[in-house]
């Protein structure tokens, strides 16, 4: 690797070669835990150049991933996000894009690996960096096309809370989720911390300078979306049509935001995802980024935080002030110091105190209150650890019912009006209403959308032959060069005929600079090759002893629908292509055994490295939702479990640890 920025032409050859020599040093060699689901090259830490006990060369690889997230009960939204380079079928991508942390003086390289179907860039907002690293297409660089990569290189000079985002068609791409917080920590000796925080929220490992004054730290990213825009890539698959509808038909000047989020979620999920947990007597640092288009009027109930930083610059002590409402413009960042306790000045005492934008419509989910970016300061002793929710005087249960936010549940108790839910809308005079002309904005409910589950596409169709009767070597090429008209990526060949019980040696040439995979999900054992190109790798599989046509595809998000899929015809093949689908059999519970890889309470999801599930799924690493958060209690990575998957609900309905 070589530093390409003009800034680094002045760096000595020795330093460059030193970084190159240690470029393969995993972050784990500095004690930084590997993020499950990422490649070994996602975060690479180099040498300690100043000899103070921490790495001063940081390389981070980011992909562009399309995801579908449930932002509040029943509301699924399509996002594009930056995500650390992945590995396998369980991407760690989430909204917002990850918080990046580096130290003052670090030599930073952020490599954008464009795995998406549109061009993108990264603009470093607020940092000091060379002009050719500014990420503005047509001004400082060409946009990074699908399958390409670009390295952004700079020295981290100005400590503070900054921002990074895509600058290609920013009126669309930023609002789709291609934005995140960038923190430059002040330089301190032995300043070891995790360089990526997925999404945002509580920062568990405080940097040295933060520890000098604070007990806890939170990164809070506020966003807002017009779901009419986000629905476009959910409804269409031809990239030409998506481009036209998003960039030419959709008028961003008439944008109407109707979903308001904190760290990629709306109330009530914010209470579980980003509660601000505090103790009396602590000092809390809140880093706040307004990555949306609205002006944010942030209000903390019962507390008066102190403004300490604006747009990464420290406010002198004699100019700091306290308020109960802070105005934060689009793209602005502020740091607040929160002093929980009972001092009758900065804080009103323990309890559960909500925090929200005081622009009232932003505390709704498409016009239904409460919703939006509401979260809460939760004092010690006021968190229900079983439910993962604050202890409140009433019940939060109704807010987790999707019907509430579809407008099908009365806001107030029907008993107030001496009626029932069943009779609620039969009590007024329809004829009287028809005699009045009344116009007001009416809520629009988009059709419910449930994202595809891994269970939809990875059922076993056929098993490899026990003993091969022949051999064949096949060269596959995959990438942008192999794409057909109306697609972005492709395989060549896209249709392959092989005999039954043949051992096939696959030579897969990845012609792009990004990650691709070649997978046959319906074959057991499952066959897959995955790596970042350009380059080639070789692996083998044995075809079944039956006539069948199986689908193969790339499992990197959007690559299959954008062209990277094909057909494996075994023997005479079958009438239809067998892309794995869930069985319609009446027996819908399948039993399996596996090892816990990761647990995501936020998504009610577990990642398992499981053995073959007889009659259902080949051995693989699989991420799947669970029926209840209680099933995840005590589940730590490395735990061996027995589980039951219900194919109707597409979730694990029972799970227990297995003793050795």
Image (spheres, grey):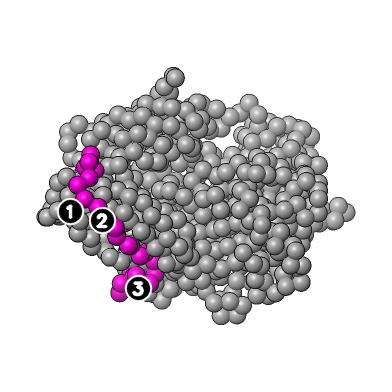
Residue at the image position 42 percent from the left and 67 percent from the top: 511
Quadrant position of the C terminus in the picture: top left
Q: Crowdedness of circle 3 by 10 Å Cα count: few (<14), some, many (20+)?
A: few
Q: Which mark is residue 472?
A: 2
Q: Is residue 611 above or below residue 162?
A: above
Relative to the observer, which residue lies in front, 486 or 437? 486
Q: CA distance from mark 3 to mark 2?
A: 38 Å
Is residue 480 found inside the magenta-colored segment of the image? yes
* Residues rendered magenta in the picture: 461-487
Residue 368 visible in the picture = no
Mark 2 lies on a secondary structure that is: strand
Residue 538 visible in the picture = yes
**Pointer 3: what residue?**
240
Based on the displayed image, in which of its 4 quarters is residue 349 positioned?
top right
Mark 3 lies on a secondary structure that is: helix
Mark 1 lies on a secondary structure that is: loop
Nearer-N-terminus badge (3/2): 3
Position of residue 505 measured from the top left corner of the image (x, y, whole percent)? 31, 54
- Circles 1, 2 touching at the beta carbon (< 8 Å): yes
Relative to the observer, which residue lies in front, 438 or 338? 338
Q: Which mark is residue 306?
A: none
Q: Crowdedness of circle 2 by 10 Å Cα count: few (<14), some, many (20+)?
A: few
Q: CA distance from mark 1 to mark 2?
A: 9 Å
Relative to the observer, which residue lies in front, 536 or 318? 536
Is residue 470 found inside the magenta-colored segment of the image? yes
Position of residue 551 measured from the top left corner of the image (x, y, whole percent)? 25, 54
Give the farthest residue toward the front.
470
Relative to the observer, which residue lies in front, 267 or 49? 49
Position of residue 322 measured from the top left corner of the image (x, y, whole percent)? 77, 49
**Pointer 1: what residue?**
499
């Amino acid at each position: 690797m070589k530093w390409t920025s003009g800034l680094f032409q002045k760096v000595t050859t020795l330093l460059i070669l030193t970084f190159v020599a240690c470029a393969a040093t995993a972050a784990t060699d500095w004690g930084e835990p590997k993020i499950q689901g990422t490649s070994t090259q996602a975060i690479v830490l180099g040498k300690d150049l100043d000899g103070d006990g921490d790495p001063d060369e940081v390389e981070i690889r980011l992909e562009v991933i399309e995801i579908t997230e449930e932002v509040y009960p029943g509301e699924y939204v399509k996002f594009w996000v930056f995500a650390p380079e992945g590995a396998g079928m369980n991407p760690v991508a989430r909204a917002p894009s990850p918080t990046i942390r580096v130290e003052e003086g670090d030599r930073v390289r952020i490599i954008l690996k464009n795995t998406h179907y549109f061009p993108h860039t990264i603009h470093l907002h607020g940092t000091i960096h060379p002009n050719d690293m500014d990420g503005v297409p047509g001004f400082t660089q060409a946009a990074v096309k699908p399958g390409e990569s670009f390295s952004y290189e700079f020295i981290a000079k100005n400590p503070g809370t900054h921002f990074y985002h895509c600058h290609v068609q920013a009126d669309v791409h930023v609002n789709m989720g291609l934005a995140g917080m960038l923190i430059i920590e002040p330089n301190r000796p032995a300043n070891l911390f995790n360089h990526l925080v997925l999404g945002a929220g509580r920062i568990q490992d405080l940097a040295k300078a933060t520890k000098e004054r604070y007990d806890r730290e939170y990164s809070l990213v506020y966003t807002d979306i017009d779901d009419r825009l986000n629905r476009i890539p959910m409804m269409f698959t031809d990239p030409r049509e998506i481009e036209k509808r998003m960039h030419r038909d959709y008028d961003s000047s008439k944008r109407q935001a109707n979903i308001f989020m904190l760290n990629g979620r709306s109330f009530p999920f914010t209470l579980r995802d980003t509660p601000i947990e505090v103790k009396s007597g602590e000092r809390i640092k809140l880093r706040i980024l307004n990555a949306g288009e609205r002006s944010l009027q942030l209000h903390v109930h019962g507390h008066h935080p102190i403004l300490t930083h604006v747009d990464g610059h420290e406010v002198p002590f004699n100019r700091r002030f306290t308020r109960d409402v802070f105005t934060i413009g689009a793209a602005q960042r502020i740091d607040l110091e929160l002093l929980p306790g009972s001092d009758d000045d900065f804080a009103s005492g323990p309890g559960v105190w909500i925090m929200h934008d005081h622009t009232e419509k932003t505390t709704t989910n498409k016009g239904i209150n409460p919703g939006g970016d509401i979260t809460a300061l939760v004092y010690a002793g006021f968190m229900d650890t079983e439910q993962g929710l604050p202890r409140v005087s009433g019940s939060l249960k109704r807010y987790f019912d999707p019907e509430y936010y579809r407008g099908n549940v009365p806001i107030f108790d029907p008993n107030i009006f001496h009626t029932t839910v069943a009779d609620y809308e039969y009590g007024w005079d329809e004829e009287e209403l028809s005699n009045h002309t009344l116009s007001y904005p009416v809520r629009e409910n988009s059709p419910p959308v449930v994202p595809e589950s891994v269970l939809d596409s990875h059922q076993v169709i056929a098993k490899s032959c026990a003993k091969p009767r022949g051999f064949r070597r096949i060269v596959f090429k995959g990438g942008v060069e192999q794409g057909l008209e109306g697609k972005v990526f492709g395989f060549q060949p896209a249709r392959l005929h092989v005999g039954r019980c043949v051992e096939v040696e696959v030579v897969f040439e990845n012609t792009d600079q990004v990650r691709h995979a070649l997978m046959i999900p319906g074959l057991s054992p499952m066959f897959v090759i995955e790596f970042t190109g350009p380059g080639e790798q070789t692996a083998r599989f044995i075809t079944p002893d039956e006539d069948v046509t199986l689908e193969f595809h790339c499992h990197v998000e959007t690559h299959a629908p954008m062209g990277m899929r094909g057909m494996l015809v075994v023997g005479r093949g079958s009438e239809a292509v067998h892309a794995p689908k869930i069985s319609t059999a009446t027996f819908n519970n399948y039993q399996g055994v596996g090892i816990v890889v990761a647990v995501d309470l936020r998504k009610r999801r577990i990642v398992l490295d499981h053995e073959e599930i007889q009659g259902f799924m080949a051995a693989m690493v699989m991420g799947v939702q669970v029926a209840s958060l209680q099933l995840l209690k005590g589940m730590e990575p490395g735990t061996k479990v027995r589980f039951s998957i219900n194919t109707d609900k597409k979730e694990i309905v029972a799970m227990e640890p297995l003793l050795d």
